[in-house]
Amino acid sequence: MTPDEAARLLAACAAFDNRQPSEMAKQAWAAALRGVPLDDDTFEAVARYYSAPAAPGETGRRWVEPHHVVSTRQKIREERLGTTIPAYNPTDPNEDAHTFVNRRRAQLHAIADGLEQPIPVQALTGGPHPRVAQALGNVGQMPTDEPYMPEGFRESIGMAAAPPELRIPCPKNGCHALIRQPCKTPHGRRRAQPHQARTDAVHATTGGAA
Ligand SMILES: [Zn+2]
């Protein structure tokens, strides 16, 4: 921010702590917050610094400093990011690393600005968000508790073929096992048999051929 912008931010601080405006302060704050824009998040950081509940043992008056603004503003933006997974691009699953990094960076920026919603990763018991499930279903042949095996490799070394139920995610509430993952008990243990709903679903999609 510029020295004039720093003066506006200091005026907002003064509303909380009665500090006196000074030329030196505005120059110093502009230098300390050179890379920080004067936006709603920055003003919000000051307000939040003064409204936060007192820490145990905290007495004296609060006095906001540039580093508080930086760390609180960062926290505000991180809260918006929430827990996100790397963005899967449904239109181009083969995009190269460079394009992915740029797109991901732009996405994180947009989420931190509040312009885009993060893709939530839900609690394991609740099953993943459909968009997450779709993304995960497209990640190679990577069952959770088995080493990587190319399609058809199990059969080629004489192992039993994967059960047909594993070709689809489990529709049962509380399970929602992903493609190629076994069904789980309510305690998260692997079930020996897939849920009936999954068996019914796979037979419906294959017309009973499986
Ligand atoms: Zn299941």
Image (cartoon, grey):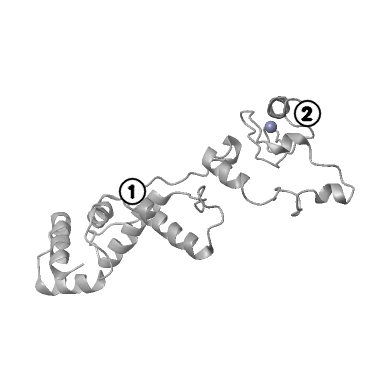
Residue 52 in view of the camera:
yes
Where in the figure is residue 94, as x and y percent of width and height?
A: 56, 56
Residue 55 in view of the camera:
no
Q: Quadrant of residue 195?
A: top right
**Where does label 1 land, which residue?**
114
For the C terminus, give its image quadrant: top right
Where in the figure is residue 41, as x and y percent of width and height?
A: 27, 54
**Where does label 2 land, which residue?**
209
Q: Could you tell me which secondary element the residue under label 1 belongs to? A: loop
Q: Residue at x 44, y 49 (%)?
A: 82
Sequence-wise, the earlier of marks 1 and 2 is: 1
Where in the figure is residue 77, as x and y percent of width and height?
A: 35, 54
Q: What is the three-letter code of the residue carrying label 2? A: Ala
Instruction: Answer with left or right where residue 26 lies relative to residue 39.
Output: left
Q: Quadrant of residue 74?
A: bottom left
Q: Between residue 147 and residue 67, name the one nearer to us.
A: 147
Front: mark 1 or 2: 2
Q: Quadrant of residue 66?
A: bottom left
Q: Could you tell me which secondary element the residue under label 2 belongs to? A: loop
Instruction: Answer with left or right where residue 156 lies relative to residue 35.
Output: right
Q: What is the three-letter code of the residue carrying label 1? A: Gly
For the N terminus, give its image quadrant: bottom left
Instruction: Answer with left or right where residue 79 lies relative to residue 160.
Output: left
Q: Residue at x 61, y 47 (%)?
A: 138
Density class for disc 2 (Cα within 10 Å; few <14, some 14-19, many ≥20) is few
Residue 169 in the image: above or below residue 65: above
